[in-house]
Amino acid sequence: MPKLLTLARRNVWRNKRRTLITAASILFAVFFAVAMTSIQRGTWGHMVDSVVKYHFGYIQVHKQGFWEDKIIDNSFDPAEVIALMKDVPGLTAMVPRIESFALASLDTRTKGSLVIGVSPELENEFTGMADRVVSGRYLAEQDQGVLVAEGLAEYLDLGITDTLVLISQGYHGINAVGKFPVRGLVHMSSPELNKQMIYMGLEKAKWFYGSDNLVTSLIANIDEAEAMDDVLAEAKARLDVAEYEVMNYEEMLPDLIQARELDLAGGQIILTILYLIVSFGIFGTLLMMVKERQYEFGILKAIGMKSYQINFMLWIETMALGLIGCLAGVLVAFPLTLYFKRNPIHLPEEQAEAFESFGVDPVIPTSTDPQIFIVQALTIFFIISLLSIYPIMKINKLQPVKAMRS
Amino acid sequence: MNESVIEISNLQKSYTETAVHVHALRGVDLSIAKGEFTAIVGPSGSGKTTLLNIIGGLDRPTDGTVKIRGNDISNLSDNQLIDFRRENIGFVFQSYNLIPVLTAKENVEFVMLLQNRSQAERDARTLELMEAVGLADRMANRPSELSGGQQQRVAVARALAPKPAFILADEPTANLDSVSTSDLLDLMAKLNEEEGITFVFSTHDQRVIDRARRVVLLEDGKIISDDRK
Amino acid sequence: MLFTVAWRNIWRSKTRTLVVIGSTIVGIWALVFLLGFFEGQVQNYMGSVIQNETSHLQYHHPNFKDDFESALVIPGAATITETLAQDNEVEAFTSRVILNGMLASSAAAQGVMAIGVDADAEQAVTNLNDKIIEGQPLTGDKKNQLLISQRMAEKLKVKLRSKVVLTFQTAEQEISSAALRVAGIYKSNKRLNDELYIFANISDLRRLAVLPDDAAHEIAVVLDDFEQVESKTISLSENSGEVLVENYRQLSPDLELMNSQIKINMTVMIVIFMLALIFGIINTMLMAVLERMRELGMLMAIGMNKVKIFLMVCLETLMISVIGAPVGIFLGFLTIEFLNRKGISLARWSSALEEFGMSDLVRPALALDNYLMVALAVVITGLLASIYPSLKAIRLRPVEALRKV
């Protein structure tokens, strides 16, 4: 058996040029596949992160029916839930929020906005918002002022010395009106959120909406994404489903998830076709390899080598070819994906606007998930094994005398 | 005296082959006249192959001169040599003479096509040549459909097409059985006697040597004997 | 003669040639189809945007779109509409009053853009009435009628005949409110818009916003001939002084960018696919040259010069590259035609698509010049692929080739 491997190894290098060209085609396909998948995953990962990590969270608890009907009347007293969810493994904290709509107005400008009453410390632990304050300062514990998202501030022509007027409809229909000094401006990486958000202290929000002790949502602050399913299961077990609803981000953002699936599916199709084309090339090479070595195989069979041994040797040679191409492709792609992960491409002004209008942050990050690379290797492995069937059949049928005459 | 077709003077050829320095030809003088039927023989290492490559314009000497039809070809470039060969030298190789994808007729007229001769001219001369080698009925066949001997005869026809100074036949009978060999030699002898075509052979085949009127023997890069019969 | 020789040469190894041709057919077929798919999506989106949002062109006060300030009406709107009415290149037009504000029901409140329209004119331009799924279109007989989207009705928990309150800023820069009654519920194909736009009678909004009788913030125009849009924009612009006239391209920059983005994508795809094909072609031709070394030596010996040999190999490469192309293109064309009639269902992702106003039924389509571009790409690929094998063929010296055992 070791002899077979030696033979195989030397045979691969017999026709250096052909080996290299075939390996190059595999390199190309693998490189492109890795690059494209990495960019896709990276972009979607970033999109999902932007909304999940920095706003929605992986899991939210609401009063049953709130998500369908996001009105302030669908709020609840968080005490019970917080107590029930104590020491669920993987759960760091339950972060309370009051979320509702309000009309924000400064001088002559008005815009609809999303108001979020938060506990400044807990919220910051969860989303790290304090770091994204671009001017002014973050909210203090019992702050009377608000944080405004950059995009909204720009629209209203708002600065940190201004006072914002908010008008809304409060709990049980009362009129909610108030004046709020602007403490700081904050950057949200989701362009949509960046145009809408206003943050205020939880207590202040309760005052504004007249909602006593009630909150609209509890965000589960999970330390690791992998823990999401477990925490979700725990929550569903512990909380009464008639009173509360527990949702993960996929349920809360089905459109985002769908869009991601659509995009990834499209990418897969393109990759499949690409690999199909490359397969033709590999098949051609295999054919050539078998054809030009008819004589040699004839001799091998004549001196007693079995078909399956020749097949195995050929298979190893082809696998080696595939492996070389694949490794090369990965080796070229990996440093690039790593580099762009740390330094994502920022799109130029023109395109940035278009991206933002579709709610996408105009950066192109990449993903270095090992799965991407492994999948390519497996694909090549599978393709080569499949293509080897034809040459194997030819070799099995080979008759030494005939072969040596050609 | 007959005009000299090939005039070689003090031919030297050395080359380096994987760290070994080889003096293939160490001063060869040779003159071949029109109408000769000459065999060049010699064991391996004698420089016979090298000499023939240079006569055939396939290689250039390190020193000395080679004149064909009075033209010094020792310093022509690769491209110039190709053009010269086309007009002046006919080749019959041991094998791989013909283009496999062309018919016999197309093979014979190929060189004339390269010379941009007209369709009429080509057709006429091809027919003439194929008749001369006795294969006028096989014009539409591809080489794979012809026997070894027939292929060699088509090669002769092809070689004659541009009216070359001489035909260089490199082991033309090596792959043939005795009947085909003698048929081929008969043809070549006939062309030589009746048309005055000059033939220069490189051969180990005794049958060819026997029929040659001049035998030049090479050893260690020099001519050691030159017998005329 | 070179053609004949080249052509016959490529069929020396039938299987090998067929593998390359096969890869070309499959690759081109897939490429053409993908291009058609993208193009179909773009056309679909563009048609939708023009139909429902921008029309062919629109008039605005130059600063209106900055903040949607109610005071910034189109100067001389009345004159403009008169001129448009007599312009026979104009198929239809409509005037609108637009207010940015908040809509509240007893249950909830929502930021909105209230569009005041003349129901008939609006229908002619955007088919607004066709989108109504419940209730009635806006008629002139009752005051303060409102059309809201199904989505908004759900959010505000209202239905037909419910009362809602619109809060907005008047032309005198004061905040005002008015009660409106839901007369009809509509559903458009772009959810993003449904969550924002409500429609009322232009006369009502003019009155509420304290605007003169003929005031308009926006005039949307549809032309008879789509091809004329660009030139018409310019000619109307020249006659309107400081009023801003923009066509759909300028109004919807994301459309323009989608267009150019798709074009880039398509070009990239062509390059990628051609590169994938080129390896196979080079490998095959290289093999074909290397196994003919003796014959090539013979050819050089009998006097075929290097240029001709280079051309011969070049031709062979071009031929094997190009044969598959027409077949692949034709198959792609057939696929596109068939799927264009049938439509490709993206129903699985319809929710996400609807958000942006993209249909979940894609009808692939491809303009002629794209087919030509693909054909050209194949030829270029063949030419590029031929360089290496052709160079290899002429680099050899006849001596070496002939003496190879």
Image: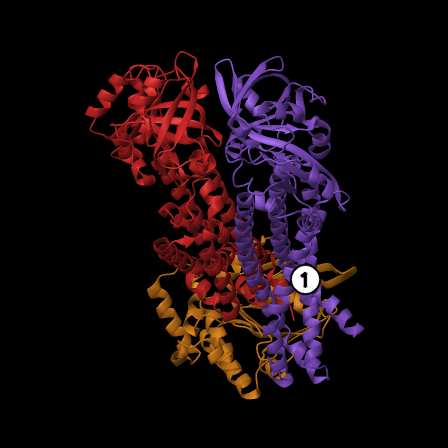
Colour orange maps to chain: B
Could you tell me which quadrant the C terminus of chain C lies in?
bottom right
In this figure, which residue is indicated by the disc labeled 1?
A321
> Disc 1 marks which amino acid?
Leu
Q: Quadrant of residue A123?
A: top right
Q: Please state the horizontal and vertical placement of residue A46, each as a whole percent of the image.
A: 63, 39
Which is more toward the observer, B93 or A5? A5
Q: Position of residue A174 (x, y in %)?
A: 52, 25
Q: Secondary structure at mark 1?
A: helix
* Colour of the chain lettered C: red
Asked whether, in this view, residue A130 is left or right of residue C203, the answer is right
Does residue C291 sit above or below A198 in this rendering?
below
Question: Residue C283 in the image: x percent, y percent?
Answer: 58, 60
Of all chains, the one bearing label 1 is A
The correct choice, above or below, for C220 with respect to A18 in the image is: above
Residue C300 vertical position relative to residue C375 in the rendered view, above or below: below
Residue A278: name its quadrant.
bottom right
Is A340 or B83 nearer to us in this picture? A340
Colour of chain A in the image: purple
